[in-house]
Image (cartoon, rainbow, N blue to C red):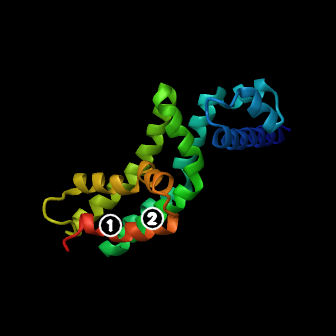
């Protein structure tokens, strides 16, 4: 009986998180009300508060769940096994493009809300730090292989990777410049090696 109750509670929590993600993405963080999430998930407002502590708690849970996945852990572990610098950078570019496709809708709303809400800004930092961790692993690996151009150390390489592969950089290319993700990825495969490696 206890196990079934726990399973039902977890299913309800997942439904609430999925509803929150849909509504945050479609309507924006501020325009979405707790009552909207409850109606979308077909639960009471009390359940929404119990499941995540309100909107901020749900957004934090969504981002933390997105950062702390088996797929992300496997991708970071794989970075440490690649011995060819070009292949390493290529894998990272493809991985960031794939994650941007999945998360861009929600992260666009997080970026819009962050300047107006300290809590959302803290949540945004969780996402940023998740990506920067993977970029640091890549930069450290490139430095170990002696692949970085003169004057570029691992710290600088991390910054250069962030300049090209952060959500902000993707939003600039896709939203402001109107590039497709295919065009963006093709350019990245040229621009990132040019920034990091000796010609």
Q: Is residue 20 visible?
A: yes
Which quadrant is home to the N terminus?
top right
Q: Residues within 10 Å of mark 1 (few under 14, many from 20)?
A: few
Q: Is residue 114 left or right of residue 47?
A: left
Residue corresponding to mark 2: 184
Badge number at residue 178: none
Identify which residue, 149 or 138, lies in the foreground: 149
Regarding mark 2 in the picture, which secondary structure is present there? helix
Q: Quadrant of residue 109?
A: top right
Badge number at residue 191: 1
- 53 w.r.t. 86: above or below: above
Name of the residue lying farthest toward the front: 177
Q: Position of residue 19 (x, y in %)?
A: 73, 41
Please name the residue shown 40% across and 56% down the image: 165
- 43 w.r.t. 97: above or below: above
Q: Is residue 173 left or right of residue 44?
A: left
Name of the residue lying farthest toward the top: 46
Q: Position of residue 185 (x, y in %)?
A: 45, 67
């Amino acid at each position: 009986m206890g196990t079934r109750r726990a399973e039902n509670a977890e299913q309800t929590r997942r439904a609430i998180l999925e509803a929150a993600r849909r509504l945050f993405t479609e309507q924006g963080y501020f325009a979405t009300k707790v009552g909207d999430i409850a109606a979308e998930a077909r639960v009471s407002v009390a359940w929404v508060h119990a499941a995540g502590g309100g909107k901020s708690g749900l957004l934090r849970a969504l981002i933390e769940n997105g950062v702390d996945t088996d797929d992300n852990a496997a991708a970071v572990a794989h970075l440490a096994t690649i011995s060819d610098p070009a292949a390493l950078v290529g894998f990272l570019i493809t991985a960031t493009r794939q994650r941007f496709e999945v998360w861009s809708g929600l992260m666009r709303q997080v970026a819009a809300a962050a300047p107006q809400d300290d809590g959302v800004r803290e949540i945004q930092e969780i996402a940023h730090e998740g990506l920067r961790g993977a970029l640091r692993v890549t930069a450290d690996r490139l430095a170990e292989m002696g692949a970085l151009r003169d004057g570029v150390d691992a710290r600088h390489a991390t910054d250069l990777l962030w300049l090209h592969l952060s959500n902000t950089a993707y939003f600039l290319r896709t939203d402001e410049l109107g590039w497709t993700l295919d065009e963006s990825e093709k350019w990245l495969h040229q621009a990132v090696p040019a920034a990091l490696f000796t010609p």
